[in-house]
Amino acid sequence: MPDYFDNLSDIGDDYLGTLEMGARRSRRGLTGRGGAGVRVPARRLIPRVPGVPMPGARLQPLGLGSTAFTAASGTVLSLTARPQRPFLGQRLVIDITRTGVTATGLVTITRLDIGTSNQLVSSGALSAAAFAATAFDVNLQLDPATPGIDITVQFALSVAPTLTDRVDISGTIFGTTVG
Protein backbone atom coordinates (compact mmCIF):
# COMPACT_ATOMS: atom_id res chain seq x y z
CA MET A 1 0.00 0.00 0.00
CA PRO A 2 1.55 3.34 -1.00
CA ASP A 3 1.97 5.87 1.77
CA TYR A 4 0.85 9.12 0.19
CA PHE A 5 1.88 11.23 3.15
CA ASP A 6 5.52 10.10 3.71
CA ASN A 7 7.04 13.16 2.03
CA LEU A 8 4.35 15.68 2.96
CA SER A 9 6.81 17.69 5.05
CA ASP A 10 9.04 17.99 1.99
CA ILE A 11 6.30 19.09 -0.41
CA GLY A 12 3.96 20.84 2.01
CA ASP A 13 5.44 24.32 1.61
CA ASP A 14 5.31 24.14 -2.17
CA TYR A 15 1.66 23.12 -2.21
CA LEU A 16 0.23 24.73 0.90
CA GLY A 17 2.37 27.89 1.04
CA THR A 18 4.38 29.48 3.81
CA LEU A 19 3.99 32.53 5.98
CA GLU A 20 7.25 33.97 4.69
CA MET A 21 6.55 36.39 1.84
CA GLY A 22 8.75 35.88 -1.20
CA ALA A 23 10.69 32.99 0.29
CA ARG A 24 10.48 29.24 0.27
CA ARG A 25 11.59 26.80 2.90
CA SER A 26 14.23 24.23 2.07
CA ARG A 27 16.19 21.75 4.14
CA ARG A 28 18.91 24.40 4.49
CA GLY A 29 16.54 27.14 5.66
CA LEU A 30 14.82 29.97 3.82
CA THR A 31 16.00 31.03 0.39
CA GLY A 32 14.84 34.13 -1.45
CA ARG A 33 13.14 34.19 -4.83
CA GLY A 34 15.41 34.03 -7.83
CA GLY A 35 18.52 33.44 -5.72
CA ALA A 36 20.99 30.63 -6.08
CA GLY A 37 19.63 27.23 -5.16
CA VAL A 38 15.98 28.16 -5.75
CA ARG A 39 14.26 25.71 -8.07
CA VAL A 40 10.92 26.34 -9.76
CA PRO A 41 8.81 23.19 -9.51
CA ALA A 42 7.54 21.88 -12.85
CA ARG A 43 3.95 22.00 -11.59
CA ARG A 44 4.20 25.81 -11.42
CA LEU A 45 5.06 25.91 -15.12
CA ILE A 46 2.02 23.86 -16.13
CA PRO A 47 -0.92 26.16 -16.91
CA ARG A 48 -4.09 25.64 -14.90
CA VAL A 49 -6.87 24.07 -16.95
CA PRO A 50 -10.37 25.28 -16.00
CA GLY A 51 -12.40 22.51 -14.37
CA VAL A 52 -9.39 20.26 -13.72
CA PRO A 53 -8.00 20.22 -10.18
CA MET A 54 -4.28 20.83 -9.79
CA PRO A 55 -2.32 17.73 -8.75
CA GLY A 56 -0.75 17.53 -5.32
CA ALA A 57 -1.57 17.96 -1.66
CA ARG A 58 -4.27 20.37 -0.55
CA LEU A 59 -6.24 21.21 2.59
CA GLN A 60 -9.87 20.10 2.20
CA PRO A 61 -12.91 19.37 4.40
CA LEU A 62 -14.41 15.93 4.96
CA GLY A 63 -18.06 16.10 6.03
CA LEU A 64 -19.12 13.61 8.69
CA GLY A 65 -22.83 14.34 8.29
CA SER A 66 -25.23 14.96 11.14
CA THR A 67 -27.26 13.07 13.70
CA ALA A 68 -29.55 13.90 16.61
CA PHE A 69 -30.04 12.68 20.15
CA THR A 70 -33.78 12.38 20.77
CA ALA A 71 -36.00 10.66 23.31
CA ALA A 72 -35.91 7.50 21.15
CA SER A 73 -32.28 7.56 19.92
CA GLY A 74 -30.49 6.40 23.03
CA THR A 75 -27.41 8.10 24.45
CA VAL A 76 -24.69 6.84 22.04
CA LEU A 77 -24.54 7.88 18.35
CA SER A 78 -21.87 7.97 15.63
CA LEU A 79 -20.93 10.05 12.61
CA THR A 80 -19.08 8.24 9.81
CA ALA A 81 -17.41 9.32 6.57
CA ARG A 82 -15.57 7.33 3.90
CA PRO A 83 -13.06 9.52 2.00
CA GLN A 84 -12.61 8.77 -1.69
CA ARG A 85 -9.02 10.06 -1.80
CA PRO A 86 -6.10 9.60 0.61
CA PHE A 87 -6.88 11.79 3.62
CA LEU A 88 -4.80 12.95 6.59
CA GLY A 89 -7.07 14.58 9.20
CA GLN A 90 -5.79 17.65 11.01
CA ARG A 91 -8.74 19.45 12.63
CA LEU A 92 -12.07 18.16 13.90
CA VAL A 93 -14.96 20.63 14.12
CA ILE A 94 -18.17 19.67 15.94
CA ASP A 95 -21.35 21.75 15.90
CA ILE A 96 -23.98 21.13 18.60
CA THR A 97 -27.48 22.62 18.55
CA ARG A 98 -29.96 22.10 21.38
CA THR A 99 -33.72 22.39 21.01
CA GLY A 100 -36.02 22.29 24.07
CA VAL A 101 -35.61 22.62 27.80
CA THR A 102 -34.57 19.01 28.42
CA ALA A 103 -31.74 19.05 25.84
CA THR A 104 -29.13 19.78 28.49
CA GLY A 105 -26.86 16.74 28.66
CA LEU A 106 -23.10 16.89 28.24
CA VAL A 107 -21.96 15.70 24.78
CA THR A 108 -18.67 13.79 24.82
CA ILE A 109 -16.56 12.04 22.20
CA THR A 110 -15.90 8.47 23.30
CA ARG A 111 -14.10 7.18 20.17
CA LEU A 112 -12.41 8.60 17.10
CA ASP A 113 -11.54 5.77 14.72
CA ILE A 114 -9.61 5.70 11.45
CA GLY A 115 -10.50 2.26 10.15
CA THR A 116 -10.07 0.01 13.19
CA SER A 117 -7.51 2.22 14.94
CA ASN A 118 -8.76 4.39 17.81
CA GLN A 119 -7.06 7.80 17.71
CA LEU A 120 -7.70 8.71 21.35
CA VAL A 121 -4.75 8.41 23.73
CA SER A 122 -6.79 6.98 26.60
CA SER A 123 -10.18 5.45 27.23
CA GLY A 124 -11.48 8.66 28.80
CA ALA A 125 -14.08 10.68 26.92
CA LEU A 126 -13.39 14.15 25.50
CA SER A 127 -15.78 17.07 25.65
CA ALA A 128 -17.24 17.69 22.20
CA ALA A 129 -17.22 21.41 23.03
CA ALA A 130 -13.40 21.29 22.85
CA PHE A 131 -13.83 20.89 19.07
CA ALA A 132 -16.28 23.75 18.54
CA ALA A 133 -15.81 25.93 15.46
CA THR A 134 -14.60 28.75 17.73
CA ALA A 135 -12.05 26.59 19.61
CA PHE A 136 -8.45 27.77 19.32
CA ASP A 137 -5.47 25.60 18.33
CA VAL A 138 -7.12 22.18 18.45
CA ASN A 139 -5.04 20.64 15.68
CA LEU A 140 -4.70 16.87 15.50
CA GLN A 141 -2.32 14.45 13.84
CA LEU A 142 -4.60 11.59 12.88
CA ASP A 143 -3.55 8.42 11.11
CA PRO A 144 -3.85 8.62 7.32
CA ALA A 145 -6.95 7.09 5.76
CA THR A 146 -6.72 5.42 2.38
CA PRO A 147 -9.74 5.60 0.05
CA GLY A 148 -12.66 3.53 1.31
CA ILE A 149 -11.57 3.43 4.98
CA ASP A 150 -14.25 4.63 7.42
CA ILE A 151 -13.57 7.54 9.74
CA THR A 152 -15.96 7.37 12.70
CA VAL A 153 -16.57 9.71 15.63
CA GLN A 154 -18.70 8.23 18.43
CA PHE A 155 -20.62 10.53 20.78
CA ALA A 156 -22.28 9.97 24.14
CA LEU A 157 -24.89 12.17 25.82
CA SER A 158 -25.05 12.21 29.61
CA VAL A 159 -28.83 12.78 29.81
CA ALA A 160 -31.25 11.91 27.02
CA PRO A 161 -33.75 14.62 26.03
CA THR A 162 -37.45 13.92 26.51
CA LEU A 163 -40.57 14.37 24.38
CA THR A 164 -39.73 16.32 21.19
CA ASP A 165 -36.53 17.93 22.49
CA ARG A 166 -33.29 17.12 20.69
CA VAL A 167 -29.53 17.65 20.56
CA ASP A 168 -28.30 17.89 16.95
CA ILE A 169 -24.65 17.18 16.13
CA SER A 170 -22.75 17.67 12.89
CA GLY A 171 -19.06 17.24 12.19
CA THR A 172 -16.30 18.12 9.75
CA ILE A 173 -12.67 17.07 9.62
CA PHE A 174 -10.25 19.35 7.81
CA GLY A 175 -7.20 17.61 6.46
CA THR A 176 -4.75 17.10 3.65
CA THR A 177 -5.67 15.15 0.53
CA VAL A 178 -3.42 14.02 -2.26
CA GLY A 179 -4.69 13.71 -5.76
Image (cartoon, rainbow, N blue to C red):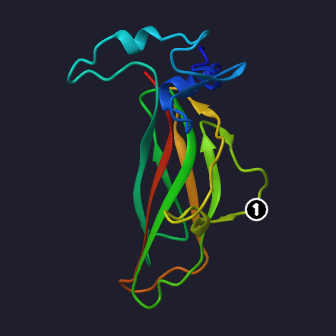
Q: In x, y percent, where is residue 126?
A: 68, 63
Q: Secondary structure at mark 1?
A: loop
Q: Residues within 10 Å of mark 1 (few under 14, many from 20)?
A: few
User: Which image quadrant: the N terminus?
Assistant: top right
| Viewer-side residue, 41 vs 136 | 41
Q: In x, y percent, where is residue 66?
A: 40, 58
User: Which image quadrant: the C terminus?
Assistant: top left
Residue 51 occupies quadrant: top left
Residue 163 vertical placement versus 80 (above, below): below
Which residue occupies the extreme right position in the image? 122
Residue 134 vertical placement versus 25 (above, below): below
Q: Is residue 147 visible?
A: no
- Residue at left 71%, top 19%? 27
| Viewer-side residue, 119 vs 37 | 37
- Residue at left 50%, top 29%? 22
Q: Is residue 93 visible?
A: yes
Please state if 20 lies on the left or on the right of 84 as rendered.
right
Residue 50 vertical placement versus 1 (above, below): below
- Residue at left 45%, top 21%? 56
Which residue occupies the extreme front position in the image? 35
Please state if 41 lies on the left or on the right of 155 as rendered.
left
Which residue occupies the extreme left position in the image? 50
Q: Which residue is mark 1?
A: 124
Q: In x, y percent, where is residue 12?
A: 56, 27
Number of numbered discs visible in the structure rendering: 1
Identify residue type, mark 1: Gly
- Residue at left 44%, top 78%? 71
